[in-house]
Image (spheres, helix red, strand yellow):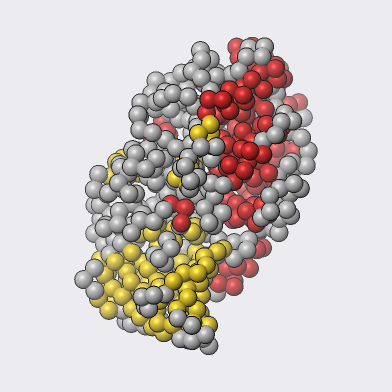
Amino acid sequence: MQHRIGEHALLADSRTAALIDPDGNVAWLCWPWIDATPLFFSILDGDRGGTFSLRPVQPNARVISRNYHARSLVLETVWEVGRARLFVDEALALADGPLLVRRMRAEGGAVAVHVAVETPAWPGQHAALRILDTTLEISGADRVAVHAPSAWEATPDGARCGFAVLPAEAQTVTLASADASTTAPSIETTLTRWRRVIPEIRQPAGAAPGTAGLLETSAAVLLGLRRNDGGIVAAPTTSLPQWPQSARTWDYRYCWLRDSSLAALAMLRLGLVDAARSLGAFIGSVVVESGPLPLVRLDGTAPPTETAIPELAGYRGARPVRIGNAAAGQAQLDVPGEVIELATALARAGALPAELGAAVPVLAGWLVQHWREPDNGIWEIRGAPARYTHSLVTTASGLEGAAALADQRLVPGDAESWRKVAAAAATELGGGDRPLELRLDGGGADAALAQVALLGGLDNLAGRVDATLDLIVSRLVRGGLVDRYEGQPDTLVDPCAPFVFPTFWLAGALAAVGRDGSRWLDAALATRGPFGLFGEVADPGDHSPLGNYPQVQSHAAFVLAVVVPETPS
């Protein structure tokens, strides 16, 4: 059974990520890295995706709660089994290698537990199971082993084992690389490691009750989906559709420099300065080596070519399933400005890494050379490149930011020439009080242009901010949320749900100009699932998460909307 997207809990450890469904099944897990071939993937194909489920044997057992332990991505599921209860704590351990730990303890009586593995069948690969008493080996792209408290036995589809969990003694099932140690760190050790890196977050003034807890969950998402000394994924999944049964199914398991910059800004707001600095250093190293690429793997190498996998049924029939992302080959002129904004914020915090400082003149020089060229824009529109207004806005803002950094002698470069190009870009945008639109030649409302109220270096556009926000509100609202843009400018005609992070942007932009953005903040907050996780988009009817999940950009936008910076941008 493929459950609703928002009913899945995320586990992550800065290497890979898993989604656990309400039945106790690992519905998604790539191994050993987050952008590697999926090991379990029933969320994309219920027949071929395999299972790794853990639950009480008793048929009438029911889940009575599923929650994260505070300041962590350690999941606790509580099953009611007659008069007894089974507590299942699950985590990708923060250890030396990828390791999935599933610990069980009982209260009120013994509980019989059943663990089942069905063999996954990723197209083009042959997976096989081998039983070695209490160890089940799964061969495929990588050899992994599932260690259990009792012996495994073969079934027609895979293998299973059963055992009793007694009140006085916990039991543990683990999944690790086949050659890894069988000694697993305790759940308590993993919780301690999480809480060492995530501070207790105070409730923001005037925020809705529970916001501090949501911010702590967002901090865990941002840290868990970021590779140590590497990049951060846009989301840990591929091909979860932006509309039911549509072909808007993209692979987001890569590092977008734009999204990563906004994630690092959110880390700064949360006080995660070391993580923000490290992510900034990675972004800077990519730019210095390769220029302002739209996206890379988390280790900085090129992502695979976008490829459809026709053998897979997709999430509830949404096809095709894709590996790789063709946006890697696009021109996206907004990227340099977004990265320079991060450099400015890190410099203000006294945390600008040398790698990002070296990247700023590279980015500014690239903008000077290319700013008049058409591109595919922040929305990665699949079609002929155009002159997108948002790209020109971030060009002007970014070059002004680079010049300010050069004035402070924090980066090398010709501040005067950068300001001249920034002024030329601002002149092309024009002044007055008309709303900004998607393209320089029109095209209607664009939700990304709410950022005009949030970016620096755009004084000449001050008279157009209110009209631009009004245009977004009047034309892009659907179900209380915000669509990306008007019309259908790309070549894919399938529908798309409204987006979560532009709704947060609108709330923040209205607040920044002294208007009431609470309606939009409340609407965006309502899209979170039961674990406090945001998708990329949401159903306009019930606001449940859709698209790849959870979405880093949505979590970053939430943080930036509710945590006010200590000093103005």
**Relative depth, front residue between 10 and 346:** 10
Displayed quadrant of residue 460: top right
Displayed quadrant of residue 112: bottom left
Q: Is residue 134 left or right of residue 285?
A: left
Displayed quadrant of residue 20: bottom left
Count of labels in the image = 0
Q: Residue furthest left?
A: 156
Instruction: Please tell me which residue is depicted at 60% across the width and 55% down the height of the picture.
Output: 217
The image position of residue 69, as x and y in percent, is 59, 65
Instruction: Please tell me which residue is depicted at 53% across the width and 40% down the height of the picture.
Output: 500
The image position of residue 173, as x and y in percent, is 43, 74
For residue 236, say whether it is visible: no
The image position of residue 549, as x and y in percent, is 47, 49
For residue 7, say whether it is visible: yes
- Is residue 526 shown above or below 498? below
Q: Is residue 103 left or right of residue 466?
A: left
**Relative depth, front residue between 48 and 538:** 538
Q: Is residue 47 left or right of residue 412?
A: left
- Is residue 552 shown above or below 166? above
